[in-house]
Image: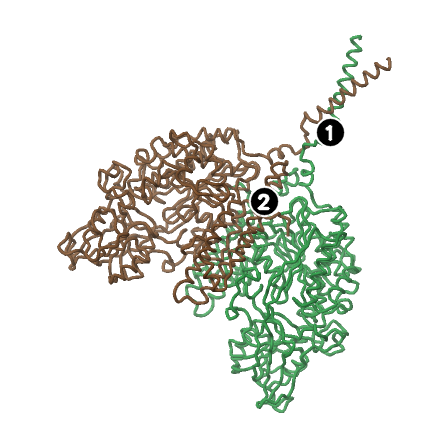
Chain colours: A brown, B green
Amino acid sequence: MHWAKILGVAIGAAALLGLGIILGHFAIPKATDPLPSSTSDSQDLDLAILDSVMGQLDASRIRENLRELSKEPHVATSPRDNALVQLLLERWRDTATGLDSAKTYEYTVLLSFPSTEQPNSVEVVGPNGTVFHSFQPFEKNLTGEQAGPDVLQPYAAYAPPGTPKGLLVYANRGSEQDFKDLEAQGINLEGTIALTRYGGVGRGAKAINAAKHGVVGVLVYTDPGDINDGKSLPNETFPNSWGLPPSGVERGSYYEYFGDPLTPYLPAHPSSFRLDLHNISGFPPIPSQPIGFEDAKDLLCHLTGATAPDSWQGALGCQYKLGPGFEPNGRFPADSEVKVSVHNRLELKNSSNVLGIIQGAVEPDRYVIYGNHRDSWVHGAVDPSSGTAVLLEISRVLGTLLKKGTWRPRRSIIFASWGAEEFGLIGSTEFTEEFLSKLQERAVTYINVDISVFSNVTLRAQGTPPVQSVIFSATKEISAPGSSGLSIYDNWIRYTNRSSPVYGVVPSLGTLGAGSDYASFIHFLGITSMDLAYTYDRSKTSARIYPTYHTAFDTFDYVEKFLDPGFSSHQAVARTAGSVLLRLSDSLFLPLNVSDYSETLNSFLQVAQKNLSTELEKQNISLGPLVTAVEKFKMAAAALGQRILTLQESRPDPLQVRMVNDQLMLLERAFLNPRAFPEERYYSHVLWAPNTGSSATFPGLANAYARAQKVNSGPEAWAEVQRQLSIVVMALEGAAATLGPVADL
Amino acid sequence: MHWAKILGVAIGAAALLGLGIILGHFAIPKATDPLPSSTSDSQDLDLAILDSVMGQLDASRIRENLRELSKEPHVATSPRDNALVQLLLERWRDTATGLDSAKTYEYTVLLSFPSTEQPNSVEVVGPNGTVFHSFQPFEKNLTGEQAGPDVLQPYAAYAPPGTPKGLLVYANRGSEQDFKDLEAQGINLEGTIALTRYGGVGRGAKAINAAKHGVVGVLVYTDPGDINDGKSLPNETFPNSWGLPPSGVERGSYYEYFGDPLTPYLPAHPSSFRLDLHNISGFPPIPSQPIGFEDAKDLLCHLTGATAPDSWQGALGCQYKLGPGFEPNGRFPADSEVKVSVHNRLELKNSSNVLGIIQGAVEPDRYVIYGNHRDSWVHGAVDPSSGTAVLLEISRVLGTLLKKGTWRPRRSIIFASWGAEEFGLIGSTEFTEEFLSKLQERAVTYINVDISVFSNVTLRAQGTPPVQSVIFSATKEISAPGSSGLSIYDNWIRYTNRSSPVYGVVPSLGTLGAGSDYASFIHFLGITSMDLAYTYDRSKTSARIYPTYHTAFDTFDYVEKFLDPGFSSHQAVARTAGSVLLRLSDSLFLPLNVSDYSETLNSFLQVAQKNLSTELEKQNISLGPLVTAVEKFKMAAAALGQRILTLQESRPDPLQVRMVNDQLMLLERAFLNPRAFPEERYYSHVLWAPNTGSSATFPGLANAYARAQKVNSGPEAWAEVQRQLSIVVMALEGAAATLGPVADL
C-alpha cells in the first residue's frame, strides 16, 4: 500500500481503537465494581416517589379507616381493643398493601376500671343519711352510642375506692394556690368534698393538692366556659353542634407519672419486679370522680359562702360561691353534704403494642418510628382513631409501593400502634424500656400523630428544634385543605407564627410535654421527636381541647359532621406526616437541622440573663460558663452545617455520609443526663424536663432557682442552682463536642 | 475495494474497536467511580505493617524512655509532672515521629498532700506526754534517691489532719470482720489507735471500718509476709534484691471512690459546681498514716493482750498480740500510748491529661483509646512509668509510619496520658465526664497499660470477654521474652489457664475492678476495656504486688536490676499492646468476639442456680427469666458471629461492615443501667459492678441476696433481690436485641 494509504488505515484503526476504548470505558459498567451497593449506598429521596405517595393518600380511605376503628368502644385491653390488634396485624401483613413484617408485644400492666356491678355515684345526703339527690351515673344516650356494656362509666382512673362525705367547697382548678386561697378566706377544708374544674393543673394533681389540705374527696367537671365558649344548652351542643353536651364527662388517667405504675424503668413482662401497691407514688390519694356540667351546675349554683373571685367564675349561669355547704333555703337543705362513692378497681391486664416494619434498603439499622396509640376511652373517634386512620392510610400507600417492588426506603420505617396510652402512655413507655439500647443507638426520629384533627383550620406541630426544617420543607409542598390555594405552610403561618432571628417570620413549633406517646422517646431516651395534627383557629374558640374529648360523644359522626367533613384535614395531616416520614427515611443526608437548636439555647440563655442573673450574681453564681457553652454549641452546629453543604457538593463516600448522619441523629442524646433530675421519673433531657419555675429557661436551672427563691431556703438550695447550671453547661459542651469534626481532639 | 478486502478491513476494524472496548473497560480506572474511597472503605489490617511495627518496637528505646520518665519524683501537679506534660507534647508533636495532633486538658481537682513544714509523725508517748520514741518520718536514703524536696513523705492521701492518741491495738487488715473479732475478744476499741496491715480491704476502708468501732487513728504497714515472701532484713531487700526495704512505706489514696472528690459526675472545670467539703463522702473519717515494717515491728512485737489468731500472724519475727497497749516490762512503758500526728492538707490543683490522636483514614469517628497515667508517688519507675515508656515507644513507631506516609489507621487512635491517677483515677474520670456522649457513641475499646512489668515471667491480661480473642490472636504471633521459643500465648497458658467449654484450655483473662484508669471507661461509660502487663510466676512469690510499690524505692535501677533486665518484658508488652491496638484500629471487621460473653453469663447463671436458687424459690423468686435471657443472648451472639463469617466471605458493602461493627462496639453499652446501683458511684455496668456477696454471679443479684440473707432483713430486701434480677434480665434481653439482625422487630 501507499504510505499515505497505510497512514490512513492506521489512523482509522487508531480512531476505531480509541472509539472502542472510549466506549468500553464509559458505556459499560464494570462488573467488578461494587456498583449495586455503591448505587444503593447513595440512595436518596426520590421526588417522584414522594409525589406519588402524596397523590395516593386518600381522604375517603381515611374516612373508612376511622369508621371501622371507632365503631365500638375500645378501651385498653377490652375485647374490641384486642380485635383492633388483629385488624392492624392483618393490614400490616397484607400481601398487597402490607409491610415486611408485623408483630405484637404484650405487657402485663396495672390498669384501673370502674366497677360494673357497683357504679360510682355522687349524691347529696342529709346528716342522717337521707339521699336528697343522686347525680346521673352515665352520660345521656343522645345518639344511641352512649349506652351499652362497653361504654365505661365516667371515672377517674387510679382514683382509690372510698365513700367520703362532707360539705362541698368550690376549689376552682384545684391548684396548690387555689386551696391556699380558700384557707386564706378562712374556710376550713378538713373533711370537705372539693368541686374543681378541669384545666390549669393535671387531673391527679387536683386530688394530690386537695388531700394536703384535709379534703376527703374531689369532684371534677368541665365548665362550659372552658370547653364550649360558654354554650351549655342541649340545642347548642352535640349532636347539634361540636359542643360538649351537658351530661358529657371527661374521663382520664389521674396517675401523675407515665408508664406502667408497677414497673418503673423495667418492661412490664409477667416476671418483672413489681412494686408493692403501697409503694406506688403518683396515684390520687383520695377518691375522685368526674361529672358533667349539668350536674356540676346543680351543686355549684347552690353553694353558700363568699363569692368566688372573678377568675374562678365560669359559664354555668350563676355566681359561683365557695361554700362550704349549700345556701340556706336553696335546692338542698343547707346542712346536706355531698357523698362521693368510688368503686374503681385496679387490675393487672395484658396490653399489646403492634409493630410493623419496612426494612431499610441501605441502612436497615436506622429507624424512623411513626406511632400512635390504639386504645380509647369510649369510641375514641378523634382520640386516638383519627390518628390511627391516618397511620393506616400511610402504611397502606407505602406498603403498596413496597409490595409492588417500586420502592424500599433507605432506612427502616417502624410503625407502631401503642396500647394503654390513656392510662399513662403505658405501651410506648414499656417499649422504650424493653428496647432502650437498640433505640438509643439507632432511632433517627419518633413521629407521633395521636389526635390527627382537633379541628380543620391549621397545622399544629410540636417537636424539638431539629425537626423544624423537615416539617417546613414538607408543608411548603402540600396544599392546605379548602379553597385558599395556600400551602399548608403558608396557611399555618397565618395562625401561629413567630419572628425568628435567623429566618424572619416562620410558623411556630410547640414544645413536647408528656401529652402523648412521644414522652418516653424524647424525655427518657433522648430521641428527636415530633407530634403533628390539624387544629383550631384560636381566635375563634377558647375551648381547652375539642369539646367531646374523652367522652362518649367522641364518635365518627362527630368527626364527620363537625370536625372534618370530607376528611380533607385528615388527608392534609397524612400528607404532612407521610412527607416528613419519607424525607427522614429516604434522604441521603438526614434532614435534621441541628443548628435550629441554637435559637432555643439563645432564648433560654437570654431569659436566664434577664430574669435570674441579678440574684445569681448576689449568690456568686456566674452565667459566664453558660454563655461560653451556648457559644460553643452554636459554632459547632454552624460549622457542621457548612461541612454538610460541602459534602453535598462533592460525591460523598457512604461512610462520610453515615458519620455526619450519626452526628445529627445522636445530638439529642447528648442532652440526656439520667442523674440530673432523679426525682422526676423518666425525665432526663436537660432542655425539656418540666419547668415549674416562672422563667422560660433551662428547666433544671429554672426549677432550682425557684426553690432557692422561696423563703427559708438555705445555702444548699443555691448550691443546687449551681449544680444544675453545671449540668446544663456539661450537656451543652458535650453536645458541641459531638458536633465538631469527628477526629478533632 | 474488493469485497473480501472490505470484509477484512471491516473485521480488522471491528477487532480493533473490540480491543479498544476491552482495554477501555478493564485497563483504565473510571474517574467518576468513587474508587479512592471504595478502596479505602475496605481498608483492612495490613499484616506487613503489623510485622513492621512489631519489629520496630525497641527495648532499648523503652529503657531510655523509662530513664527519662523516672529520673525525678513526679507526683501529680508537681513541677516535674508538668515537665512531663511538655515532654509528651513534644514527642507527640514531633514532625518525624509524632501524631496528627496533641493537646492538654486541664482540670482543677482536689488533691491531698502532707505538710512540708510539719511532717506527719508517729510517736510512743507516756500518759503525761513524754515522747518515748519517734518513728522515722521518711524512708531511708539507701540509693541516694530517697531524699530531697521532691520526695513526698509517706502519707495517706485524703486522711484528715489530727493528732489522736490512744492505746494501740492490732487489727489485722482492718476489715469490718476484723474489728468485730476484736470486740468479740472483749477488747474495747473506743479511743484506740489501730495498727493494720495492707491488703484484704481498700486503704480507706480500714479507717472507715475502724471509726465505726470508736477507733481514733489508724496506722497501716506492709507485712514482710505479704510483700517479701517473709524476707525482712536489709541484705535481703532492695538494693540487694527486689524486696521491700524495712523503711519502705506504701503511699496511696485513701479515698473510697474515684474521680475528683468535689465534682462527681461533672468535669472538674474551674467553674463547675463543687461539693462543700463536709458533703464529701468516701474520705477516711479519722487520721491515718502508713508506716514501714521496721517501725511496725517496734510496735506490734511489743503489744500486750491475747495472741492474735493464726491468720492474723505475719513475718515480723514475733508473735502478734492484739493489745490494747504494750506489754509490761517491754520496750515501752506499759501505759504508753501511740500518738499519730497527721498534717495533710487538701489543695485545689490543676492537673492535665495529654491527648494525642492519629486520625482514622476511613472511620475517623471510631476511637481506639490507649492510655496510662503519668503521675507517680515518687520516681514511679514501675508505677506508672513502665507503662508510659511503652506508650511512648508505640506512639513513636506508629507516628514514624504515619509521618512517612506509609500508613494511616482505618479508625482513629487516641493516646492518653492521664493526670492524678494516684489520687483516685482523677484525670481519666474527668475525661469520661467531659466527653461522655462522644465517647459512648464512638469509642471502640479502651486499652490500659499502667504498670507494664510487675515481673518478667508471663503476660497478665484483664478485660471484658469480647477482648479475649484479639489478645489471643496477638499473643500467638509474638515471641515470649527469653529463650523458651514459646509465643507469649503459649508461655502465658503455662501460668494462668482455665478450661473453657468452648475452646478447651486457654489462658485466663482477669476481670476489671477499679485499679487503674480503665474504671470509668468500663463502669461508667460501658466501653469495652482491657489492661495488659507482664507479671510474676505466682508459684514463686506470694507478694501482694511488686515490693517497692508506691515507695521511694520504685526507681529505674530497681526495674533494670530486678524486674526486667534487658527490658525484653517491656518489649513483649509493647508488642502485645501494639498488636492489639493495630488489630482494633485497622481490621475491617472489629476483632471483638461478643460470643465470648456467653461463657461469663453461663458461669454467672450456674453459680446463681447452684448457690441461690433454693432460697430464692422459698421466696417465690424464679431464675427462669434469667435462664431465658441468657439463652437469648447466646443465640443472638452466635447468630451474629455466623452473619459476620458469611459477610466476610462476600465482598461486603462498607455500610454493611459498619452496621455489624456498630453492633460489636455498642454491645457493652447495653449492659449499662445508671439506675441499677445509684449508691455505687459511677458503677453502672450490671455485670461488672462490685460484688460484695459470696457468689460469683451477677453483682446486683449477689449483693441484694447477701443483704436479704442477713438476720432481720424484711420483705423489702427480697423485693430488692427481685428488682435486681429484673434489671439483669432487662439488660441481657436488651443486649440480645442489639445483636439480632438490625431490621428484625
Callout in the foreground (2, 1): 2
Q: Which kind of residue does numbered mark 1 sit on?
A: Phe
Distance of label 2 from label 1 (alpha carbons): 39 Å
Q: Nearer the viewer, residue A141 or B69?
A: B69
Residue A693 seen in the current view: yes
On-image quarter of the N terminus of chain A = top right
Which subunit holds the residue at mark 1?
A: B
Q: Which residue in the rendered view is the most extreme toward the top?
A: B2
* Labels 2 and 1 touching (C-beta < 8 A): no
Task: Say the numbered circle drawn on residue A640.
Answer: 2
Q: Is residue A346 left or right of residue B406?
A: left
Which subunit holds the residue at mark 2?
A: A
For disc 1, the marked residue is B26
The crowding category of the residue bearing disc 1, from other C-alpha atoms within 10 Å (few below 14, some 14 to 19, many at least 20), is: some
Total labels drawn: 2
Q: Residue B356's image quarter?
A: bottom right
Query: Residue B89: where, in percent of width, then height?
Result: 70, 58
Q: Residue B319's image quarter?
A: bottom right
Query: Residue B203: where, in percent of width, then height?
Result: 60, 71
Q: Is residue B242 left or right of residue B128?
A: right
The crowding category of the residue bearing disc 2, from other C-alpha atoms within 10 Å (few below 14, some 14 to 19, many at least 20), is: many
Query: Residue B362: where, in percent of width, then height?
Result: 66, 44
Q: Nearer the viewer, residue B18 or B324?
A: B18
